[in-house]
Amino acid sequence: MEQRTIVHLDLDTFFVSCERKINSKLNGIPLIVGGTSGRGVVSACSYEARTFGVRSAMPMHYALKLCPQAKVVKGDMELYSQHSKLVTDVIADSSPIFEKASIDEFYLDVSGMDKFFGCYKWTTELSQRIINESGLPISFGLSVNKTVAKIATGEAKPLGKIEINSKAVQSFLNPLSIKKIPQVGNKTYYTLARIGIQKIQTLSEIPIDYLKQLLGKNGEDLWMKANGIDNSPLKPFRDKKSISAERTFLTDTFDLVKLRTELSAMVEKLAFELRTEQWLTACISVKIRYNNFDTEMKQRKISLTANDNILLNTVNQLFTEVYSRRMMLRLIGVKFSNLSRGFNQIDLFQDTERDIALHQAMDNIRNRFGASYIQRATSFKNAKK
Ligand SMILES: [Mg+2]
């Protein structure tokens, strides 16, 4: 396989930096962005807050016990989306192939460019342009694949840059904690730490078959990453305007239970698509067609979200409003538009820790077994018919 050159760009403490850009009083203090209600969680925190042990996804009440003097601001998804788009536009302008991995994170494939320019110099100039045009700090890592580039960025932060060439990959990885491998969560970490594997070097030297026994397919993957191997391709960024689902009934119906169940199933499917592709929607439409072919549509603007509950409630309200005649329906449809790239996560600033954990668990199961495997009770009734 031909040698690749991959750049990972990651905005530093993105939500915090956006807040500081519009309010300089927030500079230099412990700052937490997140849900301010009693059961909210930390969405992001400044380095000053991190020195007190505050971490993202931590319950807010606990974070404030660790750091009572922290200033807490409720997040502003519109602000973050605007800035994310601004940075995306700068990158799209200079790089033909890139992946937007999350609201504040990008991969670029600059393979072959080094014959003409130095990749490191080119990326340095790009990141400087991003800083100038967005007013936000960014770091990058440059290496032979996505995993090593991402780990490198983590080591370079904040406002840092680092290049790990193919010869240096293993010696760069060896002393680092296995926690630095993006796919190692707490559970995997403790499984491995319990048997004495804490450094990437140790992991890279374990027989691959042993890891397969211990962790299944995941173990093989992990071993490859510990050895600096990752052939995963970039998923090119495409702009999307909307996503939608429609259902035409075999026989016209005004069975409200059936109609609402159908809407619920469509919302879940679309919301799952939003979350897996990291989109948020700001406009919801419901369309109906009566059995005389009259078609009516109702739409509503909402704050950016991919939260099932918010989407479903809005869809239900719109359906109640649009379905005004006592006539049978032959079609219903749901559309989410005004999409923005955003978090894999829901209405970050209203959801409680439990909601987020529940959605993540459901998405994990969907990812493993397919989208139809898990559904809410309301849509399940329909699936059985
Ligand atoms: Mg970031």
Image (spheres, rainbow, N blue to C red):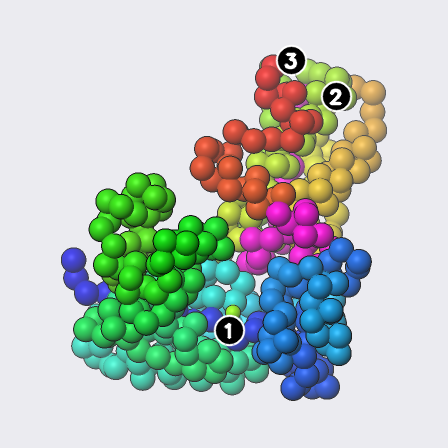
Residue annotated with mark 1: 11
On residue 30, the disc is none
* Quadrant holding the N terminus: bottom left
Q: Position of residue 22 (x, y in %)?
A: 69, 80
Disc 3 crowd, CA 10 A, few/some/many (<14, 14-19, 20+): few
- Frontmost residue, 30 versus 370: 30
| Amino acid at dot 1 | Leu
For this view, does 331 lie left or right of residue 197? right
The answer to whether mark 2 and mark 3 are in CB contact below 8 A is: no
The residue shown at (43%, 56%) is 189
- Frontmost residue, 352 versus 94: 352
Q: Nearer the viewer, mark 2 or mark 3?
A: 2
Residue annotated with mark 2: 257
* Quadrant holding the C terminus: top right
Question: Which circle's residue, 2 or 1, is located before the other in the chain?
Answer: 1
For this view, does 334 lie left or right of residue 160? right
The image quadrant of residue 231 is bottom left
- Frontmost residue, 89 versus 276: 276
The residue shown at (60%, 78%) is 51
The answer to whether mark 3 and mark 1 are in CB contact below 8 A is: no
Q: Position of residue 292 (x, y in %)?
A: 71, 20
Residue annotated with mark 3: 251
Disc 1 crowd, CA 10 A, few/some/many (<14, 14-19, 20+): many
- State whether label 1 is within 8 Å of ligand 1: yes
For this view, does 157 lie left or right of residue 20? left
Alpha carbons under labels 2 and 1: distance apart = 46 Å
The residue shown at (26%, 59%) is 204
Chain part drawn in magenta: 329-357
Q: Position of residue 377 (x, y in %)?
A: 67, 27
Alpha carbons under labels 3 and 1: distance apart = 53 Å
| Amino acid at dot 2 | Val
Residue 138 to residue 310: above or below: below
